[in-house]
Image: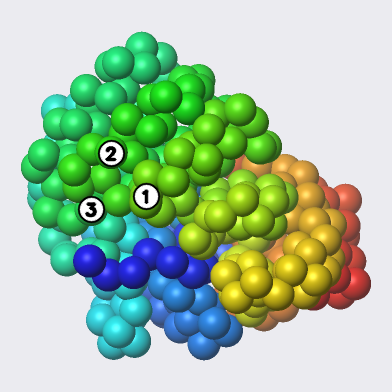
């Protein structure tokens, strides 16, 4: 299996000023984060605003990401699946490109039992053409998972690991890391990336890495090589940036920073997202100057 260690960047979806998909900007940005040291890309994650894309646009985004990944010989993680098991099976089994892994979220809104979550992922894992990464993000799904459930999922064949984004280092996190299941844990909370790497996470999927890919790649590498002093220094220096980028709904602030830096043509987002406020923009730009 392709290594899933390192920094994976969940790419934004650039739009033109009139709100159309900007394929050229996406391709440039994907190459730029790889040039800066990212291990791989994540296509159609939350940061990509997939719910606001048409099916044709989602297919185009995946085509671009797959093309860049193939050209650069770097792994691609694709997001697929939702809160209905049958539709998730269809989405996963009909992906048009080979990928290193499929990132699939814990079923949201319906708030199934933890046994229901396990049954859902067992069905997906049984048919998935690539290893699954369970996206555990309770503040979006409304379904927190216990340490015992995480460990059961970690021991399920064809589940390779987790994007762990529980809003902190909680009891379930400690229990999962202490279990030493051999599963891959990728940090999914930007402000808690350094603490989770310190506990033994093998990498990260971080939206803030759209802005500072080299710095976040260095953070992951420093923890991996045991350079604790450097890892702490980098992690602490990036906290203000991560806080500023998430002061308003993701990816609004990230997009405005990229646009201000001339890396995309427009900070446009689609409703119900609204553009970042002037205050959030100023704070984020200041953080990129002082911290990165």
Of the two numbered discs 2 and 1 on the same chain, state the one appearing first in sequence.
Answer: 2
Query: What residue is drawn where x is 26% and y is 81%?
Result: 70
Question: In the figure, 291 relative to 111: above or below?
Answer: below
The spot of residue 257 in percent (x, y) is 72, 66
Instruction: Locate the N terminus by quadrant.
Output: bottom left
Which numbered tag is attached to residue 108? none
- Residue indicated by mark 1: 183
Q: In this view, does 13 lie to the left or right of 127?
A: right
Depth check, mark 3 against mark 2: the one in front is 2
- The reply to whether residue 134 is in sight is yes
Of the two numbered discs 1 and 3 on the same chain, state the one appearing first in sequence.
Answer: 3
Q: Residues within 10 Å of mark 2 (few under 14, many from 20)?
A: some
Q: In this view, does 241 lie to the left or right of 77?
A: right
Q: Residue 121, located in which quarter of the rendered image?
A: top left
Q: Are marks 2 and 1 in contact (CB under 8 Å)?
A: yes
Q: How many angstroms separate mark 1 from mark 3 (CA)?
A: 11 Å
- The reply to whether residue 54 is in sight is no
């Amino acid at each position: 299996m392709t290594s899933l260690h390192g920094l994976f960047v969940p790419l934004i979806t650039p739009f033109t000023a009139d709100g159309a998909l900007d394929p050229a900007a996406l391709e440039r940005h994907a190459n730029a984060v790889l040039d800066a040291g990212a291990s791989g890309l994540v296509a159609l994650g939350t940061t990509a605003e997939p719910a606001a894309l048409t099916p044709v646009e989602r297919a185009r985004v995946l085509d671009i990401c797959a093309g860049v990944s193939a050209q650069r010989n770097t792994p691609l993680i694709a997001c697929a699946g939702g809160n209905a098991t049958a539709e998730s099976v269809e989405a996963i089994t009909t992906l048009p490109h080979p990928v290193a892994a499929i990132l699939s979220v814990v079923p949201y809104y319906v708030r199934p039992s933890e046994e229901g979550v396990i049954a859902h992922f067992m069905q997906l894992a049984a048919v998935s053409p690539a290893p699954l990464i369970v996206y555990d993000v309770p503040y979006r799904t409304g379904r927190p998972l216990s340490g015992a459930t995480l460990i059961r999922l970690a021991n399920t064949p064809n589940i390779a690991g987790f994007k762990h984004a529980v809003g902190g280092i909680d009891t379930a996190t400690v229990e999962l890391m202490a279990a030493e299941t051999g599963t891959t844990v990728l940090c999914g909370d930007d402000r808690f990336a350094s603490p989770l790497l310190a506990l033994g996470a093998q990498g990260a999927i971080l939206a803030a890495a759209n802005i500072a890919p080299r710095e976040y790649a260095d953070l992951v590498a420093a923890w991996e090589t045991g350079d604790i002093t450097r890892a702490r220094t980098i992690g602490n220096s990036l906290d203000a940036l991560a806080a500023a980028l998430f002061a308003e709904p993701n990816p609004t602030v990230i997009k405005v920073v990229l646009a201000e830096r001339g890396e995309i043509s427009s900070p446009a987002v689609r409703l119900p997202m609204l553009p970042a406020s002037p205050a959030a923009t100023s704070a984020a730009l200041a953080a990129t100057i002082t911290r990165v």
